[in-house]
């Protein structure tokens, strides 16, 4: 059709690790604007994928057309005769993450947000995708097939469709009679767990039960699991999720359950954040950061339920869930940044903070994933007290907003809560806006549980150390800790404790005693210095456990809370 945009990706020489892109369309005006996406929905930071683009050329029937660059990712064509245009460029594809582009002689995996240009005036036009590759490779893409091509109804659907290419096959599975495909890439050393497909099915079914609807992706869902030597993460799409996990994590006792939690997390995003979307993301602006406090709901609520889904699927048990939730709460309580940054601010600052974390970020930031999950726990228990549940509220928001494509904001959430309990709606404001306002201990007590510190077995010196080129180097100095009192700073090299050489970070702690000052020799900018460090007793982590003397009222609420649906 005349208004269609044709996108052709050439992968026939994968050893080059490049994608050769051709985009063809018909210009209806003499002025054309081309924009390369600045970010990928689901990963809220500007990564400048245009840095990997080169050899850009635009041609018309009359020959090459000059392009004027207005910004690193933005070009303008001033005068071109209306008619067919052809844009070609190359994307260097060497970054194997769920949001970038990667090609090598064994397979290719890419997000089209890192590959395809947005053509002004064509955003809502159908885009047809074709991929050329070796005949031994198959192309897997969650778009509708249209002959030799895949058809996206518009640019957004194209961008939301991750492409996997290689000599691997899909394993079909069913979720409530809807056909899905499981695509496994990279065999772990011990092989894939034999129960994986069945357990993935159960987790996906449990997610659909939690949401009270069949999967919105219908018969078109592609679940990709890439098992690598390192890496962890996932990216959600309307009809797909791409997960990265690593062999060593899978081999750990909790690794398989964590993989299932990641599956549940990305599958639940099919509802929460993809279709039930914060209002600021309707529609997405791929050209700049889009600030939204709603990310706390998108990721926090999803992170809370991903802990629960293996239990709902029959793949875990109550005490394991208590431990998983306790670990999440512990990570919140161990982060001094919870006293600095509110949950809403954490979500709004995602663009410049969460995705750019360093060793010292923990002192001034709190993850909206983790604090969001802890907030979801507090909301859920309070709603259970009122005969309601967080899952019920999520389903209600889905019905009024997600299902009909309306973006939501805090006012919509509060309206739902107000109808149940105005106090809880006001509490949510405080939990979102005021740092460290979450009543975790009090909430745990409602279900006969307690949150307690676990003492550190050794002395707390208040320093995070790393071994760099054979040297022991300070990476972080804890706020108000002994290291700060000793005026040590990140970057200092620790040389000796009381005259004894320190060659490994473990040596450092073993030479210290609680409440006993030690003389630390260090190097800063190649000059030696000394200081007194006096370690204290510290907290290793926090533990969520059952209160043995819980009342019958607490046990009743606990039982209700465990239903989750
Ligand atoms: Zn997520």
Image (cartoon, rainbow, N blue to C red):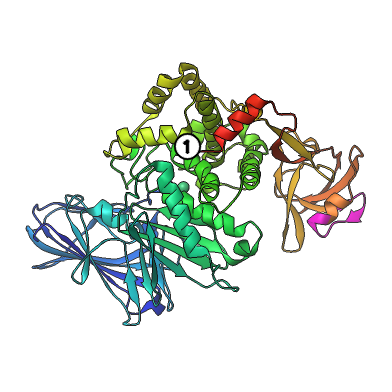
Horizontal arrangement in the rendering, residue 522 relative to residue 179 (left or right): right
Please name the residue shown 52% across and 56% down the image: 260
Please name the residue shown 18% across and 70% down the image: 147
Near mark 1 (Cα within 10 A), the count class, few <14, some 14-19 or many ≥20, is many
Instruction: Specify whether residue 463 is painted magenta.
Output: no
The residues colored magenta run 496-506
Marker count (numbered): 1
| Image vertical order of residue 445 relative to residue 325, above or below | above
Quarter of the rendering occupied by the N terminus = bottom left
Instruction: Specify whether residue 502 is painted magenta.
Output: yes
Horizontal arrangement in the rendering, residue 118 relative to residue 103 (left or right): left
Q: Position of residue 261 (x, y in %)?
A: 53, 52
Q: Position of residue 295 (x, y in %)?
A: 44, 39
Depth order, front residue of 1/474: 1
Q: Secondary structure at mark 1?
A: helix
The residue indicated by pointer 1 is 296
Q: Position of residue 203 (x, y in %)?
A: 47, 53
């Amino acid at each position: 059709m005349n208004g269609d945009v044709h996108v052709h990706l050439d992968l026939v020489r994968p050893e080059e690790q490049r994608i050769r892109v051709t985009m063809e369309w018909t210009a209806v005006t003499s002025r054309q604007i081309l924009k390369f996406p600045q970010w990928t929905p689901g990963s809220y930071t500007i990564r400048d994928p245009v840095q990997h683009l080169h050899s850009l050329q635009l041609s018309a029937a009359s020959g090459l057309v000059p392009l004027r660059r207005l910004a690193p990712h933005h070009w303008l064509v001033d005068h071109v005769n209306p008619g067919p245009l052809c844009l070609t460029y190359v994307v260097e594809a060497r970054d194997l993450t769920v949001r970038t582009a990667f090609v090598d002689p064994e397979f290719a995996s890419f997000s089209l947000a890192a590959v395809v240009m947005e053509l002004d005036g064509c955003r809502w036009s159908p885009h047809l995708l074709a991929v050329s590759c070796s005949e031994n490779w198959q192309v897997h893409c969650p778009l509708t097939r249209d002959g030799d091509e895949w058809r996206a109804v518009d640019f957004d659907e194209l961008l939301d469709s991750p492409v996997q290419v290689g000599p691997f096959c899909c394993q079909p599975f069913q979720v409530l009679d809807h056909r899905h495909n499981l695509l496994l890439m990279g065999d772990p050393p011990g092989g894939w767990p034999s129960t994986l497909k069945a357990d993935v099915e159960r987790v996906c079914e449990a997610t659909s039960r939690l949401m009270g609807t069949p999967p919105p992706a219908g018969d078109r869902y592609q679940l990709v699991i890439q098992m690598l030597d390192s890496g962890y993460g996932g990216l959600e799409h309307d009809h797909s999720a791409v997960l990265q996990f690593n062999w060593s994590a899978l081999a750990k006792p909790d690794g398989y359950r964590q993989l299932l939690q990641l599956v549940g997390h990305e599958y639940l995003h099919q509802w929460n954040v993809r279709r039930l979307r914060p209002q600021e993301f309707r529609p997405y602006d791929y050209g700049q950061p889009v600030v939204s406090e709603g990310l706390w709901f998108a990721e926090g609520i999803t992170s809370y339920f991903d802990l629960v889904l293996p239990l709902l699927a029959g793949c875990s048990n109550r005490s394991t869930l208590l431990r998983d939730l306790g670990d999440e709460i512990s990570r919140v309580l161990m982060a001094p940044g919870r006293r600095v940054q509110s949950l809403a601010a954490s979500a709004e600052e995602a663009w410049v903070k969460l995705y750019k974390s360093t060793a010292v970020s923990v002192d001034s930031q709190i993850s909206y994933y983790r604090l969001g999950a802890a907030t979801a726990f507090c909301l859920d228990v309070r709603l259970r007290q009122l005969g309601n549940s967080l899952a019920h509220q999520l389903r209600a928001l889905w019905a009024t907003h997600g299902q009909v494509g309306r973006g939501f904001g805090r006012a919509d959430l509060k309206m739902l809560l107000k109808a149940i309990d105005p106090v809880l709606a006001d509490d949510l404001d405080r939990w979102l806006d005021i740092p460290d306002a979450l009543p975790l201990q009090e909430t745990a007590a409602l279900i006969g549980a307690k949150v307690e510190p676990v003492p550190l077995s050794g002395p707390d010196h208040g320093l995070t150390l790393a071994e760099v080129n054979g040297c022991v180097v300070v990476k972080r100095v804890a706020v108000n800790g002994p290291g700060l009192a000793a005026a040590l700073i990140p970057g200092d090299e620790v040389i000796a404790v009381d005259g004894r050489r320190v060659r490994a970070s473990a040596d450092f702690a073993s030479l210290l005693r609680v409440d006993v000052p030690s003389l630390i020799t260090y190097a800063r900018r190649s000059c030696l210095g000394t200081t007194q460090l006096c370690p204290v007793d510290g907290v290793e982590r926090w533990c969520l456990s059952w209160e043995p003397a819980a009342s019958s009222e607490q046990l009743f609420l606990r039982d209700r809370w465990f239903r989750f649906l």
